[in-house]
Amino acid sequence: MRAKELEKFKKLLVLQKSELLNNTSKLIKEEAQHSPDDLADETDLAVSEVNQNLALRLRDRERVLLQKIELALSKIDDGTYGTCESCEEPIEPKRLEARPVATMCIACKEEQEHKEKVFAY
């Protein structure tokens, strides 16, 4: 992959990382403003708990995405970004534009998903 393309993907990944970190800090500030004592009844408390559970799941997904972004950035630094981890062929630039943290080419990812689907049942 050319240096110009790598720099473009690095900027995109750094931007995604920054946005995720900013969103997480906003959520934490919003959650800190709410107190269980402020809730009027059991329904309000139940809705608050559902919202907290959803926020926790979202933060966990964001944490996983941050780890993938960090991995992609380290691969850019060590020169292995854009190479499929399975077949070691180059990953199409269009795939990387759609999913910059991709670690597999389309064919290998489809094969992996097919195996997961078959063994899930």
Image (spheres, rainbow, N blue to C red):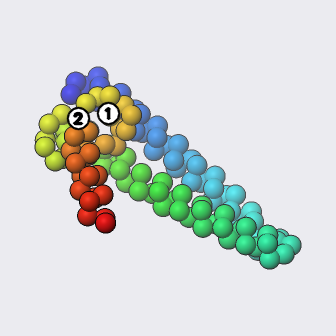
Q: Position of residue 46 (x, y in %)?
A: 73, 72
Please, what is the three-letter code of the amino acid marked with disc 2?
A: Ile
Image check: 51 left or right of 38? left
User: Badge 1 is on which residue?
Assistant: 95
Residue 81 visible in the displayed image: no
Picture quarter with the C terminus: bottom left
Residue drawn where x is 32% and y is 34% of the image: 96
Residue 65 visible in the displayed image: yes
Image check: 81 left or right of 52? left
Pointer 2 with pointer 1, Cβ within 8 A: yes
Which one is in front, 111 or 26? 111
Residue drawn where x is 59% and y is 54% of the image: 25
Q: Secondary structure at mark 2?
A: loop
Q: Position of residue 57 (x, y in %)?
A: 53, 62
Picture quarter with the N terminus: top left
Q: Position of residue 118 (x, y in %)?
A: 26, 59
Please, what is the three-letter code of the amino acid marked with disc 1?
A: Arg
Q: Residues within 10 Å of mark 1 (few under 14, many from 20)?
A: some
Residue drawn where x is 29% and y is 22% of the image: 4
Residue drawn where x is 56% and y is 64% of the image: 56
In this rendering, the answer to whether 13 lies above or below 47 is above
Q: Secondary structure at mark 1?
A: helix
User: Badge 2 is on which residue?
Assistant: 91
Distance of label 2 from label 1 (alpha carbons): 7 Å
- Res 63 quadrant in image: bottom left
Q: Residues within 10 Å of mark 2 (few under 14, many from 20)?
A: many
Which one is in front, 29 or 106? 106
Image check: 58 left or right of 86? right
- The disc placed on residue 31 is none
Q: How many numbered discs, if any?
A: 2
- Res 29 quadrant in image: bottom right
